[in-house]
Amino acid sequence: MSAVKITEGIYSVGIQNPNMRVFDIVMKTDSGTTYNSYVVKGSEKTALIETCHEGFFHQYLENIKEVCPLEEIDYIIMNHNEPDHSGSIAKLLELMPKAKIIASQAGSLYLKNITNRCDLDVQKVKDGETLDLGGRVLTFFFAPNLHWPDSMFTWVEDAKTLFTCDFLGCHYCEPYTFDTNIAYPKAYDAALKLYYGAIFGPFASFVRKGLEKIKALPVQPEFICTSHGPVLTKAGRMDEVIANYEAWSAPVVHEVPVIPVFYTSAYGNTAKLAEKIREGILEAKPNAECVTYDIIEHDMDKLHALINECDAFAVGSPTLNRDAVPPVWNLLAGIDAINAAKKPALVFGSFGWTGEAVGNIQTRLLGLKMNVFEDGFKVTFVPNEEDLENAKEFGKSFALSF
Ligand SMILES: Cc1cc2nc3c(=O)[nH]c(=O)nc-3n(C[C@H](O)[C@H](O)[C@H](O)COP(=O)(O)O)c2cc1C
Ligand SMILES: [Fe+2]
Ligand SMILES: [Fe+2]
């Protein structure tokens, strides 16, 4: 794709990657992605905003050259320095001798480590600082943890254009630049939600602050130029995308405590403990929403959402070959480690002779800084009446502890 004019003196010069199917190891990208980059011209100076993945360098240069000779770039503004945006920096600098890199303090440090050039000359800007391109002023607003500590927005007030890098973007690729032409709206909606969940889900409070910063702008943007997916326009999806972010980042308020009991069980022994632990929890907190979930019978995405949204949980695994079983590890792999600290958790399980599962799970949860209840609850093989009564008491004490 070649350069596309966004508005007077602002051009999209990024790259399309329709074939990408996995991003950052964990994110499925059924609709590919784009690495957006923009040229912003003032009467005296020209800035490049973000660069692109280095795998597409040649085409990227061609796009820039359509709107500006490379050597005329005065600034490279890095709102965020993950290599999908910063990957071309080192090569670009060779072709843009006078270009000055601009980033936040954190961004400057990351960029030096990413390029392995401790002498890299980065101009560090402060929150609210401005840069005059001649008849056109850029303002930098810090947007920490959206989604790295280095993130910031660049605002061009005269053009009512905001550059937000990953924020409000998504991995989605069509032959069009603007959101007014999306041919597969359902696929776009799905990509937006998936991207939000994977990238911004752990940073809901920062998302709310980022949205407030946009609302507080002296005039509302006509264009939001993200670094993945279509450019958002007032006439197109902008308001809807912002409303989605507001809804997805809203604090979750539970009317009653939500305390799921997750388990899995080969011969029903850990299952019996799960049931008794649930009874004990409900004895202590009768109004709680406390349901048992056999992990292998439920959709893992739903269980991941539940384990992150709940107020506390219990998790049980038998010991098989000296460890907890893979479905339990899969469940625990979905815990949002950024927000897990202090959440109360109870671990239980039946075992035959060595019984490592409970201890191993506890170690993992403690590593996530969770509030793990006592030493967990273990029973050899089939729980007898006394074991079941003890499991119930253990669940009750757990529920009374928070
Ligand atoms: C394939 C297999 C491997 C096992 N390995 C261990 C083990 O390493 N250590 C241990 O304490 N128990 C081991 N056990 C015994 C189980 O932990 C025990 O049968 C337990 O009661 C099963 O609980 P469940 O019915 O909830 O699955 C193993 C059982 C199976 C089927
Ligand atoms: Fe990123
Ligand atoms: Fe990105």
Image (spheres, rainbow, N blue to C red):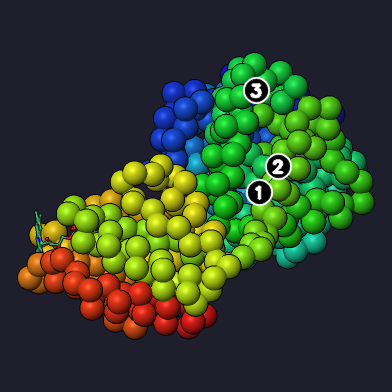
Question: Which badge, 1 or 3, comes first in the chain's sequence?
Answer: 3
> Image point 61% across, 19% down: which residue?
184
Instruction: Point out residue 24 in the picture as x, y percentages from the top left corner.
Output: 42, 44
Residue 164 visible? The answer is: no
Q: Secondary structure at mark 3?
A: helix
For this view, does 97 lie left or right of residue 344? right
- Residue 364, located in which quarter of the rendered image? bottom left
The residue singled out by tag 3 in the image is 185
- What number of labels is visible? 3
Of 140 and 31, the residue lying toward us: 31
Pointers 1 and 3 in contact (C-beta within 8 Å) = no
Instruction: Point out residue 106 in the picture as x, y percentages from the top left corner.
Output: 58, 64
Instruction: Point out residue 166 in the picture as x, y percentages from the top left corner.
Output: 61, 44
The residue singled out by tag 2 in the image is 244
**Disc number for residue 248:** 1
Q: Secondary structure at mark 1?
A: helix
Task: Specify the farthest residue to the left.
Answer: 353
